[in-house]
Image (cartoon, rainbow, N blue to C red):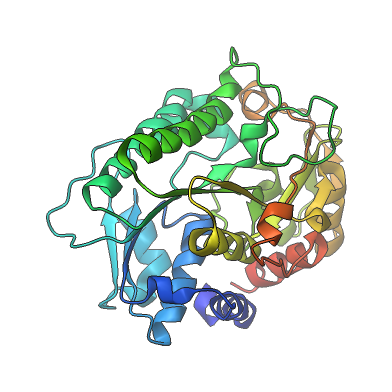
Amino acid sequence: MNLYDNAYYMEDVRRTAGLDLPWDRLKDKAVLISGATGLVGSFLIDVLMERNLAGMNCRIYALGRSEERARARFGEYSSHPLFSFIPYDINLPFVREDIGKVDFVIHLASNTHPIQYATDPIGTITTNIIGLQNMLEFACAHGVERFAFASSNEIYGENRGDIELFDEKYCGYIDCNTLRAGYPESKRCGEALCQAYRKQKGIDVCIPRLTRSYGPTMLMTDTKAISQFIRKGIAGEDIVLKSAGTQFYSYTYVADAVSGFITVLLKGESGEAYNIADEASDISLRDLAALIAENAGSKVIFEIPDAVEAQGYSKATKARLDGAKLRKLGWKPVYDIRSGMRRTMEILGQI
């Protein structure tokens, strides 16, 4: 069974596609999406293609590094006239003569895995900065209506102990002279680069800030703790926790992450950043491991991380985001952490 045969997954897609949003902004338009085969990008494409069944007529250009992965993930759309996959490394300038007018650019591509932070720190930084600039240059050349840059909860750094929830103006501590700093510092630089292009070249930019997202579209190669927990749980194995688990983070189920992203894209103010977060999905790493073990019928065991793994781990011990600004645009999540995790494991356990 693939995702499209799964009733729960398609229910999530159709619910998101049926939200009361100004979808007319995308009618008869063209959208270019980088990072198309990733956790968020693939669900977003499924939602847009679902809207196309209702006559939205939105042309989708999906960018990704792996044509093989794209064929496996988007085989349903291989002959659809409104869908095109384009193999592309975003570290290279993006110049295509075979693409017509593009109205929206959604930039999701990024190295988001801890092992990549530790083993390819240069690639992590260049992807987040040079890759973003290539997409911004493409957007300027094509006169797009709006550019959406997927930023991250990582930009907030470590909680300084002066606040419980990070609003969009908070700026925590990051020690830039560490290997692990490459990811958050380059995402911060990415936001600044968007503002520079907005001011200097007049491009309309919005910045949805994603939390630690999870769901049935996760890649099996993902090395984030939550992804490793879920893989173990689906296999019926014990959940391996490689720390005391006191880290307290915000998480978001992929359907809610995408509904928040689309809300920012279609309703957010130009130049503004919005946290996609809900307090009902905040949980400590230890409790998250226990929740997944409970769903899997297994237990949590502790293990010391190896040196490479440890280098890639976030040093933030508390990173909870305030989603009030996005809720003012009308966004409401469907899943809390318990129901979202149960949903994820139900779907992945069937495919």
Instruction: Give the number of callouts.
Output: 0
Q: Is residue 93 above or below residue 184?
A: below
Viewer can see residue 13: yes
Q: Residue at x 39, y 40 (%)?
A: 198
What is the x, y in percent for residue 136? 33, 42
Q: Is residue 46 above or below residue 244?
A: below
Q: Is residue 2 shown left or right of residue 200? A: right
Q: Residue at x 53, y 81 (%)?
A: 5
The quadrant of the rendering that contains the C terminus is bottom right
Q: Which sits in the foreground, 47 or 297?
A: 47
Q: Residue at x 21, y 62 (%)?
A: 101
What is the x, y in percent for residue 212? 66, 47
Q: Which sits in the foreground, 107 or 162?
A: 162
Q: Which sits in the foreground, 306 or 33?
A: 33
* Residue that extends furthest to the left in the rendered view of this protein: 97
What is the x, y in percent for residue 88? 28, 47
Q: Quadrant of residue 37?
A: bottom left
